Image (tube, rainbow, N blue to C red):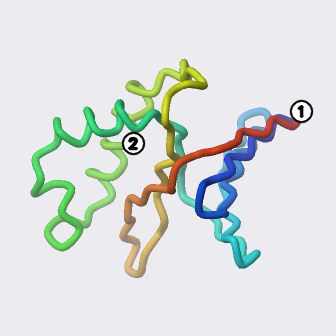
Amino acid sequence: MMRIKYHTSKGSIYTHTSEGEQDYWVKEGKDGRVYPLAEGLHISKAKLTELVREYPSSLLDKTYCFNVGVEKEFFEDAKVEACNDLYEAEETVVIFMVKRDGGRYAICCSSDVVNIERIE
């Protein structure tokens, strides 16, 4: 099992756990409440900005388009962009998906990651 905790500037902790084929994310708010996430990804702010510019604004506008396909497609593209080759000098964030009512998903972004803790 591998667990990585991403501590953010606003006090939240995003935990990515991998156990064999299982892979899951949770968010712990600064108030101590824990929230399961549908998916998560640690990515540099520069790569995320680049990716957002490539998507038409209408697809990312949460008031206009709420289908799982767009969010999943965005996350797949983000995984390719992230490449897990992050340098410590880069500013990074965690982007994540949360499940909303009616089977819809929302894409969210953490504040800046300030510390990474690896637990094996």
Please tell me the numbered disc located at residue 120.
Answer: 1
Front one among 82 and 90? 90
Amino acid type of the residue tagged 2 in the rendering:
Phe
Q: Secondary structure at mark 1?
A: loop
Tag 1: amino acid: Glu
Q: Image quarter for residue 45?
A: top left
Left or right of 41 on screen, residue 17: right
Q: Measuring 70% from the left and 42% from the top, which residue is drawn there?
A: 115
Sequence-first disc among 1 and 2: 2
Task: Using the rendered view, name the quadrant where residue 14 is placed.
Answer: bottom right
**In the shown orientation, is residue 25 left or right of residue 80?**
right
Q: Residue at x 16, y 35 (%)?
A: 54
- Percent x, y for residue 111? 50, 56
Along the viewing direction, whichever of 40 and 52 lies nearer the viewer: 52
Residue 7 vs residue 99, the one in the foreground: 7
The residue singled out by tag 2 in the image is 75
Give residue 12's quadrant in the image.
bottom right
Up-down relation of residue 84 to residue 65 (above or below): above
Count of numbered circles in the view: 2
Spatial CA distance of label 1 from label 2 is 26 Å
Image quarter where the C terminus lies is top right
Q: Position of residue 94 (x, y in %)?
A: 52, 47
Q: Is residue 32 left or right of residue 94?
A: right
> Between residues 89 and 32, which one lies in front from this camera angle?
89
- Write the residue at 16% across / 42% down: 55
Residue 53 x, y percent position in the rendering: 17, 39
What is the crowding at mark 1: few (fewer than 14 residues within 10 Å), some, or many (at least 20)?
Answer: few
Percent across and percent down for residue 69 are 29, 51
